[in-house]
Amino acid sequence: MEEHEIVAALAENRLHEEVDAIEQTGALHGIHQVLFSRALGLGIPRAELVRRIDDATFQVARSSMLDINELKLMNRKTLEGYDPKLARDVYRAQIHVMIDACAEAAANAG
């Protein structure tokens, strides 16, 4: 997805469903990057955003019985090689919390 498509889907409250339909972690990574920048641009403090992302990652690690510290050490390519489904689950969970954070920030600003 291009940045303008991501922003439009976010504004139209359909990004959650679109993210769930994406199977390629590379595409999810691109959405992740756009949303991280967007969230910071909406005034969400970096520390708060990182905490939310870490919490989402912890939940995925916990449900997969993987040590959170082990998961945090893996980059996207390593995680894909280890378990492609887990990689998608991590990206989706992180993206979903950023979507929610952006929606909250927009509602508070508006």
Image (spheres, rainbow, N blue to C red):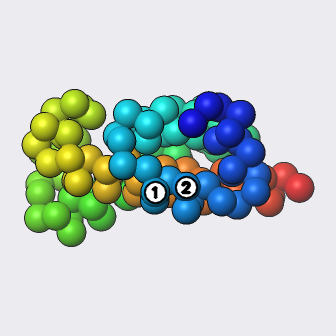
Disc 1 is placed on an element classified as: helix
Q: Residue at x 35, y 40 (%)?
A: 25
For badge 1, the amino acid type reads Ala
Residue topped by disc 2: 18
Query: Is residue 7 placed above or below 11 in the rendered structure?
Result: above
For badge 2, the amino acid type reads Glu
Image side of residue 79 versus residue 24, left or right: left
Residue 10 position, x and y percent, is: 69, 51
Q: Residue at x 68, y 39 (%)?
A: 5
Residue topped by disc 1: 21
Mark 2 and mark 1: span between their CA atoms? Answer: 5 Å
Query: Is residue 107 placed above or below 6 in the rendered structure?
Result: below
Image side of residue 44 versus residue 50, left or right: right
- Marks 2 and 1 in Cβ contact (< 8 Å): yes
Image side of residue 58 versus residue 13, left or right: left
Q: Is residue 73 visible?
A: no
Q: Is residue 1 visible?
A: yes
Residue 89 position, x and y percent, is: 31, 56
Q: Residue at x 56, y 60 (%)?
A: 16
